[in-house]
């Protein structure tokens, strides 16, 4: 059995020091979603971190690909590239979502190599969590 223990409200923050968290928080914009509302266009230019509620990750043909729970990182694959993602996110219930602009995040990371390394480590772990869920937990 795989057990994922969260020690911060937002997974990304466990990789950062207090100063870096404050810098990152300046980039956050908040979006409120009602059930069935979607995040599509923002996925190409934003990192997505649900604060509360749950999002479904939906692929071609409305196929459920997985879930995004509060505190988890999503759309990290697009954070340092301009590649479109093959899915969108749909709110299952009322959600508050933090969005971090990709361009502002890139600029911040270029000015602080340590921050960039820490964020990339968080993205790698987020990807690993998705792979574990996809192959073992959610199906």
Image: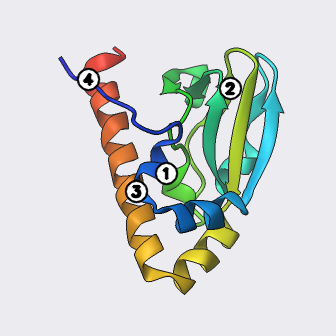
SS at badge 4: loop
SS at badge 1: helix
Quickly name the residue at label 4: 3
- Of labels 3 and 4, earlier in sequence is 4
Between 93 and 77, the one nearer to me in the picture:
93
**Residue at the left extreme of this rendering:** 1
User: Does the CB distance between marks 3 and 1 fall below 8 Å?
Assistant: yes
Q: Is residue 64 above or below residue 126?
A: above
Quickly name the residue at label 1: 13
**Residue at the front extreme of this rendering:** 18
- Neighbor class of circle 3 (other Cα within 10 Å; few <14, some 14-19, many 20+) is some
Quickly name the residue at label 3: 15
SS at badge 3: helix
Q: Position of residue 66 (x, y in %)?
A: 47, 25
- Of labels 2 and 3, earlier in sequence is 3
User: Does the CB distance between marks 2 and 4 fall below 8 Å?
Assistant: no
User: Does the CB distance between marks 3 and 4 fall below 8 Å?
Assistant: no
């Amino acid at each position: 059995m795989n057990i994922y223990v969260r020690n911060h409200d937002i997974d990304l923050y466990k990789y950062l020091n207090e100063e870096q968290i404050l810098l990152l928080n300046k980039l956050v914009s908040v979006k409120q979603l009602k059930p069935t509302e979607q995040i599509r266009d923002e996925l190409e230019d934003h990192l997505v971190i649900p604060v509360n509620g749950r999002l479904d990750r939906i692929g071609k043909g409305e196929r459920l690909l997985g879930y995004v729970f509060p505190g988890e990182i999503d759309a990290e694959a697009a954070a340092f590239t301009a590649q479109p993602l093959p899915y969108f996110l749909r709110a299952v219930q009322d959600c508050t979502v933090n969005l971090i602009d990709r361009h502002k995040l890139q600029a911040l990371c270029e000015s602080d190599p340590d921050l960039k390394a820490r964020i990339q480590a968080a993205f790698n772990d987020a990807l690993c969590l998705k792979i574990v869920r996809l192959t073992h937990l959610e199906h």
